[in-house]
Amino acid sequence: MNVPHLLILLHNSMRTSSTNSIMIGIAICDLITLSQNVYERVQGYWFYGVLNSCMNQDNYWYMYSLLIGDFLLTVFERASFWLGLFLAFTRFVIMKMMTTTLEISKPLYGYLLILVLVGLSSAHSLYYYGRYNIVQWDTWEPEETHRTCRLILVMTILYVISSAPAGFSEYVTLFMTVQPDSVLGILVGYGSIFISALFCLNASLHGIINFTMSSKYRQTVRECLGLEKPQRGSMVFVTILVSVLYPILTILLIFVIRKSAKFTSRALNSRITEERHRTCRLILVMSIFYVIGSAPAGFLEYVGLFVTVEPNSILETLLGYGSIFISALFCLNASSHGIINFTMSSKYRKTVKMCLGMDKPQPQGNMASVTVTKTSSHS
């Protein structure tokens, strides 16, 4: 549904206003977002979703591709909603300033807006995903149990190193006669200092060993220092903000359309005014679909941010299935753009006919009248 819609919008006859150029950006963002969904489903269901003991289900490059896919999904899904928001806002401003020609009505404004919004969304998502990394393991094994065992083994070796000289010194003192001025007496005397140094070194290394070999220890250190990975608070705020702004702009568009309908009846050039009015209604319908598509996502993000969700509760189940419902709404919203444009835009329908070679030839009325006149004059 999105590929033919994008091809029609890219036609020369459609690239004449900022409204259409913004819709080109929306179509591209939707196409990338839905393509990532398709890739993840195909890989998960047909390849890595199969219980095959000969296949590594946690393949490094597969996990890496999923991380990149999540980044692209976040970037272009957010950009799509924001472009839809600015599409409604741009049309609102144009309708309010109907008597003047604004720079924001030119196609260049839409293209610049696409670059700015995609760039901001990329920077925001890069800040969130930038601190994630994927660690590659050669062979699968029960990770935490094995790592903890190795940690304790290293600590035990250090304890052996630090306790062996002390045990040897005590053995010498207990079973041998040590003369005060003898070499053995000097070694035993300085040995106590050496043993104290070993004990201090062993005690000091415990924190370093735990930090080096325990991921849970490192995570706790980051939490104590305030260096833990950024939470999704900012990502959630963006979704909630979009969900709140869409209904507001939709209501404003409704008032502007009602006002422009009265102006249309008094305007001298009613055809141009009616075309603007029709475009505004088209964007209003798209905005309503965006409200339907973004409101549940904003509500779920709000609940996840401010409400404590108990494990195995009804709310947790609703949030889990809610993500599937939101994906379906996004797919429905993205697929409806071509249908809405074809239904409500005569220029869009004309472009479709041109692309399909179905455009009717223009009537040659003047040439026909001239031909008739010449024929009658000869007769």
Image: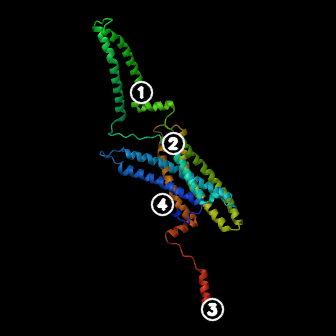
Residue furthest to the left in view is 175
Query: Given the image, on which type of amino acid does mark 2 rest?
Result: Tyr
| Residue picked out by circle 2 | 127
- Distance between mark 4 and mark 3 Cα atoms: 56 Å
- In the image, taking residue 126 as reference, residue 102 lies left or right, namely right
Badge 4 crowding class, 10 Å Cα cut-off, few under 14, some 14 to 19, many 20 or more, is few
Which residue is drawn at the image coordinates 47% and 49% (left, top)?
72
Asked if residue 292 shows in the view, the reply is no
Dot 3: element? helix
Asked if residue 107 shows in the view, the reply is yes
Percent coordinates x, y for residue 334 in the rendering: 51, 56
Of circles 4 and 1, the one toward us is 1
- Distance between mark 4 and mark 2 Cα atoms: 31 Å
- Distance between mark 1 and mark 2 Cα atoms: 29 Å
Query: Given the image, on which type of amino acid does mark 4 rest?
Result: Val
Badge 2 crowding class, 10 Å Cα cut-off, few under 14, some 14 to 19, many 20 or more, is few
Badge 3 crowding class, 10 Å Cα cut-off, few under 14, some 14 to 19, many 20 or more, is few
| Residue picked out by circle 4 | 3
| Residue picked out by circle 1 | 208
